[in-house]
Amino acid sequence: RKQQDLQDLQNRLTNELMAETQKNNLQLRDSINSFLKDYNKLKGYSFIISNTGGDNLLYADRTLNITQEIAEGLNARYVSAPKK
């Protein structure tokens, strides 16, 4: 019986962790998308492409890489956001 209780607890905690991780990932994606909308109002790009490993970007001129600007802007927004 104890072993079953421990297994049930492990399953419940695993499910809670997965749900919390998914919620945090969605919040992060929403935050990045919101920032990119504001950022693009100033910069006027036609498109902004992610260059994570799973995307279709095969080559890009490094001078067009705005990753550092985006990271700095997101960090500034995060620092000034009210803490929970």
Image (tube, rainbow, N blue to C red):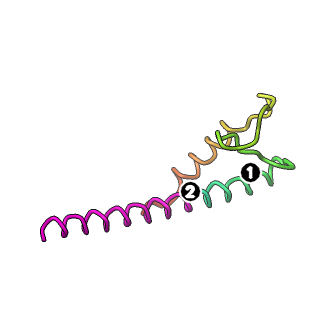
Q: Marks 2 and 1: which is nearer the front?
A: 2
Viewer-nearest residue: 5 or 44: 5
Q: Which of marks 2 and 1 is nearer the N terminus?
A: 2
At 76% from the left and 39% from the top, the residue drawn is 57
At 50% from the left and 64% from the top, the residue drawn is 23
Which quadrant holds the N terminus?
bottom left
Which quarter of the picture shows residue 26? bottom right
Disc marking residue 28: 2
At 77% from the left and 28% from the top, the residue drawn is 62
Residue 59: percent from left, percent from top: 79, 31
**Which residues are drawn in magenta?**
1-28
User: Dot 1, how many residues are within 10 Å of its Cα: few (below 14), some (14-19), or many (20+)?
Assistant: some
User: Dot 2, how many residues are within 10 Å of its Cα: few (below 14), some (14-19), or many (20+)?
Assistant: few
Please, what is the three-letter code of the amino acid marked with disc 1?
Answer: Tyr
Which quarter of the picture shows residue 50? top right
Viewer-nearest residue: 14 or 20: 14
Which quarter of the picture shows residue 16? bottom left
Identify the residue position indicated by label 1 in the image: 39
Secondary structure category for the residue under label 1: helix
Q: Main secondary structure of the magenta part?
A: helix
Disc marking residue 47: none
* Disc 2 to disc 1, C-alpha distance: 16 Å
Please, what is the three-letter code of the amino acid marked with disc 2?
Answer: Leu
Viewer-nearest residue: 22 or 5: 5
Residue 24: percent from left, percent from top: 49, 60
